[in-house]
Image (cartoon, grey):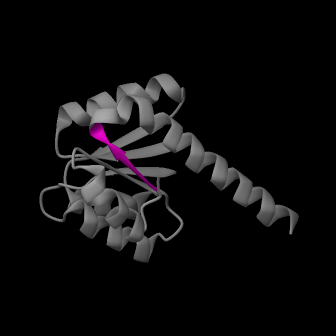
Amino acid sequence: MNILIADDHVYVRRGLRELLTDAFSGAHFTEASTGNEVLTLLVGSQPDILLLDINMPGLSGMDVLKEVRQTYPQMPVIMVSVQSESQYALRCMNAGAAEYVNKNNASEALVPAIKKIMDASANAALCTITQ
């Protein structure tokens, strides 16, 4: 599994990577610290999942999400933010995010969110093959 972690704080990226390394052995991680860097990295390779912070320097996470939806419509994006879920979760989901995870709950919520997305992707692939 290839995961792109996009957050402007190196310690947040490191923490998310460590959390996910424990849960998904063998996963490969790429990191970006700006919205522009995310889009540049996506040109070279497409991750299985993009973890994207809302508040990014340059292009915001919402701007990046909009571009990803247009250019890579099948790529699952999990918005990860410290912002209140009541303020941003619905907005992110309406913009095309697969999930919204608050950073304060990431240690409990992120792994299940990724497993849910990967299970849905696997089931969709099976349906496509059998049709």
* Percent coordinates x, y for residue 97 in the rendering: 42, 61
**Quarter of the view holding residue 10:** top left
Is residue 1 in view?
no
Q: Nearer the viewer, residue 111 or 34?
A: 111
In the rendered view, tell whether residue 75 sits above or below residue 115.
Answer: below
In this view, which residue lies farthest toward the top?
22
Q: State yes or no: residue 101 in magenta.
A: yes
Q: Nearer the viewer, residue 18 or 108?
A: 108
* Percent coordinates x, y for residue 119 in the rendering: 65, 47
* Percent coordinates x, y for residue 45 in the rendering: 45, 57
In the rendered view, tell whether residue 104 sits above or below residue 7.
Answer: above
User: Which secondary structure dominates the residues rendered in magenta?
Assistant: strand
Q: State yes or no: residue 3 in magenta.
A: no
Residue at coordinates 37% horizontally, 25% vertically from top-left?
18
Of the 4 image quadrants, the one containing the N terminus is: top right
Residue at coordinates 38% horizontally, 64% vertically from top-left?
43
- Total of numbered circles in the picture? 0
The range drawn in magenta is 99-103
With 12 as the anchor, is 41 left or right in this view?
A: right
Q: Nearer the viewer, residue 41 or 17?
A: 17
* Percent coordinates x, y for residue 35 in the rendering: 22, 60
In this view, which residue lies farthest toward the left?
57
With 104 as the anchor, is 19 left or right in this view?
A: right
Is residue 77 in view?
yes
In the rendered view, tell whether residue 128 sits above or below residue 104.
Answer: below
In the rendered view, tell whether residue 26 sits above or below residue 70.
Answer: above
In this view, which residue lies farthest toward the front?
86
Residue at coordinates 19% horizontally, 63% vertically from top-left?
60
Of the 4 image quadrants, the one containing the C terminus is: bottom right
